[in-house]
Image: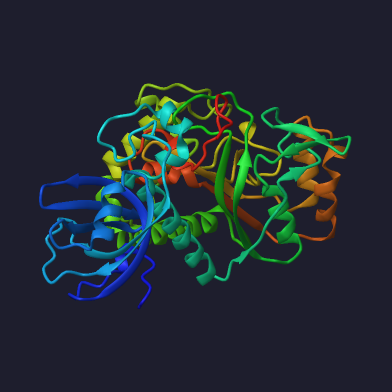
Amino acid sequence: MKKIDYIRDIPRMPGSKVKIGGRVSRINDLKSARFIWMRDITGIVQLTVLKGKADPKILKTAEELMPNYFVIVEGVVPAEIKAASGMEIIPERIEIVSKPHGPAPIDIEGIYETGMDKRLDWRALDLRSPRQMAIFLVQSKLLEGMQKYLYSKRFMQTFTPSVLGVSQEGGSEVFSFSHFGKNAYLRQDPQLHRQLLMLAGFEKIYEIGPSWRAEASNTPAHLTEHRTCAAEMSFIDDERDVMEVEENLITHAVKTVAEECKEELKTLGVDLETPKPPFPVLEFPKIYDILEELGFHPKRGEEDYNRQGEEALARYVKEKHNSDFFFVNRFPYAIKPFYVMRVDDAPRWARSTDLIYKGLELSSGGQREHRYEKIIEQAKDKGMDVSDLKWFTEFFKYGAPPHGGFSIGIERLTARLLNIQNVRETALFPRAPDRLVP
């Protein structure tokens, strides 16, 4: 008999033999029949056990089943499919492989509302729900779309360290620990190592992996551990080349989701629109004029904008350009790290970019400084001890191509695409100041 791995692959032809595995979702017991709905990661199928016709062994096993039993079922597609889902099997064999020890502590099917904290306490059960499963199927397809685009542009996948011997950005928002008696840190973002790969001659690289930030922010937009898709590229003219790659990457990934996740988007009630590049670009110092029109008054050349200003700029772009995506460029150099490139003929501004989507920063990036003397000068200007940076800066003495890149937050992008208000829902096992388990 042909083995069917997934419910979605069950043939519709009457008489087709199938074999599937999954979890019992719910049961409806009538006088003439017992209907059992069974789920796997691809969908739901109705098992129909007719009490007057079924084999006594099948009927006995079917009557034992309860929600959250895991079973393997062999059966046949009926001549007439009556199930609302369009998937139905008349079982010929039911094997129980696991029995629950009692009712689940949360509602998995979404019939009753359960608070997020309790759902996250029981996360592995929460992830059984069709809605939660759909979120991560979309996220997986989003990443697949990103990778396909990057491979098509000859980007090479790489892996940079998560454990560092120095705090890369010189800030305090890092997790520190002892590494065989020496101080070590979990990375905030391995950008400096990606830059070193540009010096090594790798030219176009990307990586997908975790980063950590020890920021005590219990907000719907923050995690202490998050994942990014980051890219770095050589021989760019300026930061606009980086922005072009990023907007095309986003467009290709969202289009992939829209085309290949129709069922998941339907489950989530999302009508996904593929963005159209080029994305609008707002630049400092012009942004100060816009912010002042909107009622915000940051110090020119010394500050950018706060969370409320970010949301106001998003509304402005939506009204003026009808776009949910836009770039902010040429940030004040005063608020940026030492490694960014300044605009040579206007050094008050940096070739530094953010991508905003639906009022939330998704990524940061831009052009990096590749000239050794400038890097040292800027590190001193930021009050940094250049001897602590030798592990990074010394390599620039021996030549470096002009380069730049970006880093996109995967959980934030997923949440915004699916209109999910809390980013914790888009991390399988979210880490936050108040949550370390499960």
The coloring applied to the image is rainbow
Q: Residue at x 84, y 47 (%)?
A: 391
* Along the line of sight, the residue nearer the viewer: 102 or 85: 102
The answer to whether residue 256 of the structure is visible from this angle is yes
Q: Residue at x 53, y 27 (%)?
A: 300
Q: Is residue 395 left or right of residue 62?
A: right
Q: Quadrant of residue 302?
A: top right
> Could you tell me if residue 328 is visible in this image?
no
Left or right: 430 in relation to 78: right
Q: Is residue 92 shown left or right of residue 292?
A: left
Question: Looking at the rendering, which quadrant does residue 312 occupy?
Answer: top left
Q: Nearer the viewer, residue 110 or 17?
A: 17
The image quarter in which residue 292 lies: top left
Residue nearest the viewer, comparing 181 with 100 = 100
For this rendering, which residue is in front, 98 or 159? 98
Q: In this rendering, is residue 59 above or below 152?
A: above
**Residue at the outermost front position:** 56
Residue 207 in picture, x, y percent from top left: 61, 56
On-image quarter of the N terminus: bottom left
Q: Report x, y in % for residue 111.
A: 25, 35
Percent coordinates x, y for residue 221 in the rendering: 46, 32
Task: Name the residue located 44 percent from the left edge and 26 percent from the top edge.
Answer: 117
**The C terminus - image quarter:** top right
Q: Tag count in the figure?
A: 0
Q: Is residue 105 above or below residue 407?
A: above
The residue at 78%/29% (across/down) is 383
- Measured as percent of width and height from the top left, residue 133 is found at 38, 48
Q: Relative to 293, is 412 above or below? A: below
